[in-house]
Image (cartoon, grey):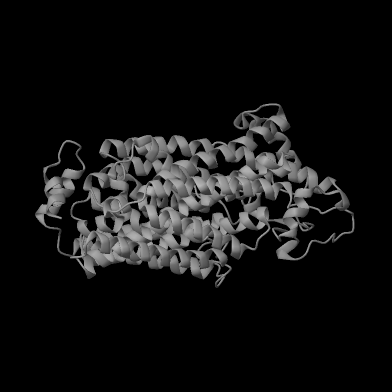
């Protein structure tokens, strides 16, 4: 066993033991604790849990790689703007009002606000979004275990499934929440330490956000020398111009504000005020990673360009050999590495002579090795990546479990079910969802960041419009909401399947990528909901008054009566 594998195993055992202990100490016996942690989580802790829940494997593992390798710098900023800007929308437009409405799940709000048909559509939407999202998380778990512990991706995913099963099934939302607080602490430390070390090594400045600015000129010039467009230049990819930057940013932003596993977090807050402050804390905690990711991307890409194009194949550093051994660094289109022009080096360029393909998902995981940091730091980064993936996976699996157990079993099949029966159904559903998630992790439809971006598009196209209209337009109707959700979800999902290379590989409409179609689906949803609402029966006067009341902090009479009647 190498030093890196040993330290990875040490950190994995320590952190997994902490998560399991927290879950055991937080085990629950009521549906309120299982679904929303009893609504008693303090705002700072809730903010940290939200950050861990939302900063998935895509943020930790894939985002810096997407910025540096997938979208060449400037274009990758769509992920920074979209995934953080969505929290502003969430804090201002949705979180406090949904918390005041006082329900366990997002489909429950939809069902109470609109109708049972709309609730069923919302359940289907939540399950589809969550499974697409969780595929990326479990794929990230398999990636980490493959590289750092030398096991196959399948074995890695199975280990991750076992850990999530234990603390999610035992502790429900209460156990997941406090586990995620610990997981946030692990992932942010693991992300910041190598970033600080690499910045200090490369520039003498330990603050990566400042050191980042000192190397951009060198990186721009180096990219031009090797055939790339400048790293900071805008719209360099013909397939990724202004239109697609706008569509992808909007899909990620509105998708963030419509993600079921994020929104349910605001039901765990103690009050409406605490829900607002939870969003503020979440933005602070998320910002620590998001203002660091661009610097990690730039430092690492600079090192890669300098190393590959100037180093003889026989003298390549150990990190290159290690990652190529697990087929995450390959030749063009996944072929074996070859010195095609026989010049003694592997040329990494932006032109026809490119001889190396580097998987986007390895950049952060490889950054400590690329930066020459010791084995314990490499092991810590691996533990951070696992924390990011598992924290989000558990939140997503709880959404699937609660949507089926609460909104299908309890609300529609067996309204007389006892607390124990509901908990048993929730746990059985959770176990089944974990098995499906494991399969998707072993057979993901793309790299981690891409898969997660698809989930955001689906959330934007299905949930965001009917949530906004449900809160701010009291005459939005049940038939309008159901028609809008179905149209938005089906249109967006069909387009994704049609255009993704793993399925049909179609060209798409006007060059719109699968990651940006969620914005169009959202607009379709808005249009269908509004149009159908004009010609279908309006909500009852009582519901219209209730919708009016939830927008005003001082009005609670109808909301309290509504909760008591339920």
Going by the image, does 254 lie left or right of 16? Answer: left
Residue at the far right: name it.
343
At a point 22% along the width and 48% down the height, the residue shown is 101
* 147 w.r.t. 429: above or below: above
Quarter of the image where one finds residue 201: top right
At a point 47% along the width and 56% down the height, the residue shown is 164
At a point 15% along the width and 58% down the height, the residue shown is 539
* 296 w.r.t. 401: above or below: above
| Front in this rendered view, residue 558 or 399 | 399
Estimate the x, y position of residue 190 in percent, counting from the top left: 59, 40
Quarter of the image where one finds residue 96: top left
Q: Is residue 451 visible?
A: no
Residue at the far bottom: name it.
504
Going by the image, does 428 lie left or right of 117? Answer: right
* Image label count: 0
Quarter of the image where one finds residue 551: top left
Q: Is residue 315 visible?
A: yes
Going by the image, does 34 lie left or right of 115? Answer: right
| Front in this rendered view, residue 515 or 159 | 159
Estimate the x, y position of residue 447 in percent, counting from the top left: 58, 59
Q: Quadrant of the C terminus?
A: bottom left
Estimate the x, y position of residue 233 in percent, counting from the top left: 64, 42
Estimate the x, y position of residue 134 in percent, counting from the top left: 48, 59
């Amino acid at each position: 066993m190498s030093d890196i594998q040993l330290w990875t195993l040490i950190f994995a055992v320590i952190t997994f033991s902490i998560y399991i202990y927290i879950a055991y100490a937080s085990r629950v016996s009521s549906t309120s604790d299982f679904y929303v942690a009893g609504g008693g989580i303090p705002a700072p802790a809730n903010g940290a849990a939200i950050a861990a829940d939302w900063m998935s494997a895509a943020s930790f593992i894939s985002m810096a790689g997407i910025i540096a390798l997938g979208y060449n710098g400037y274009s990758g900023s769509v992920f920074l703007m979209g995934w953080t800007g969505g929290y502003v929308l969430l804090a201002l437009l949705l979180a406090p009002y949904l918390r005041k409405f006082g329900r366990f799940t997002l489909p429950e709000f939809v069902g109470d606000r609109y109708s049972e048909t709309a609730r069923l559509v919302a359940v289907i939407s939540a399950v589809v979004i969550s499974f697409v999202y969780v595929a990326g998380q479990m794929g990230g778990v398999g990636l980490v275990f493959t590289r750092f512990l030398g096991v196959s991706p399948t074995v890695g995913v199975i280990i991750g499934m076992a850990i999530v099963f234990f603390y999610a099934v035992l502790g429900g939302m209460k156990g997941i929440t406090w586990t995620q607080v610990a997981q946030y602490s692990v992932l942010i430390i693991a992300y910041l330490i190598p970033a600080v070390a690499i910045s200090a090594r490369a520039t003498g400045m330990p603050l990566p956000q400042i050191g980042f600015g000192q190397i951009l000129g060198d990186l721009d010039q180096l990219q031009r020398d090797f055939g790339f467009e400048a790293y900071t230049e805008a719209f360099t990819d013909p397939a990724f111009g202004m239109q697609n930057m706008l569509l992808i940013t909007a899909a990620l932003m509105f998708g963030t504000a419509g993600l079921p596993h994020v929104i349910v977090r605001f039901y765990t807050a103690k009050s409406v005020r605490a829900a607002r402050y939870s969003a503020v804390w979440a933005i602070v905690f998320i910002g620590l990673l998001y203002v660091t990711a661009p610097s990690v991307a730039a430092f690492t890409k600079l090192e890669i360009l300098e190393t590959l194009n100037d180093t003889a194949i026989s003298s390549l550093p150990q990190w290159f050999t290690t990652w190529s051994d697990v087929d995450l660094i390959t030749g063009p289109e996944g072929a074996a590495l070859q010195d095609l022009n026989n010049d003694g080096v592997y040329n990494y360029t932006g032109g026809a002579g490119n001889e190396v393909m580097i998987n986007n998902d390895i950049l952060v995981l490889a950054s400590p090795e690329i930066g020459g940091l010791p084995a314990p730091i490499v092991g810590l980064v691996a533990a951070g990546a696992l924390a990011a993936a598992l924290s989000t996976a558990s939140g997503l699996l709880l959404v699937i479990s609660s949507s089926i157990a609460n909104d299908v079993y309890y609300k529609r099949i067996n309204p007389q079910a006892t607390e124990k029966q509901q908990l048993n159904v929730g746990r059985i559903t959770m176990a089944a969802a974990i098995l499906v998630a494991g399969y998707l992790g072993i057979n993901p439809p793309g790299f981690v960041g891409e898969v997660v971006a698809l989930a955001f598009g689906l959330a934007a196209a299905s949930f965001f419009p009917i949530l906004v209209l449900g809160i701010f337009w009291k005459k939005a109707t049940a038939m309008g909401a159901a028609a809008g959700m179905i149209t938005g979800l089906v249109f967006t999902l069909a387009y994704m399947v049609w255009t993704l290379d793993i399925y049909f590989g179609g060209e798409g409409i006007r060059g719109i990528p699968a990651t940006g179609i969620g914005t169009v689906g959202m607009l379709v949803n808005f249009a269908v909901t509004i149009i159908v609402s004009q010609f279908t029966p309006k909500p009852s006067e009582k519901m219209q008054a209730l919708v009016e009341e939830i927008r005003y902090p001082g009005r609670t009479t109808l909301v309290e009566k509504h909760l008591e009647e339920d």
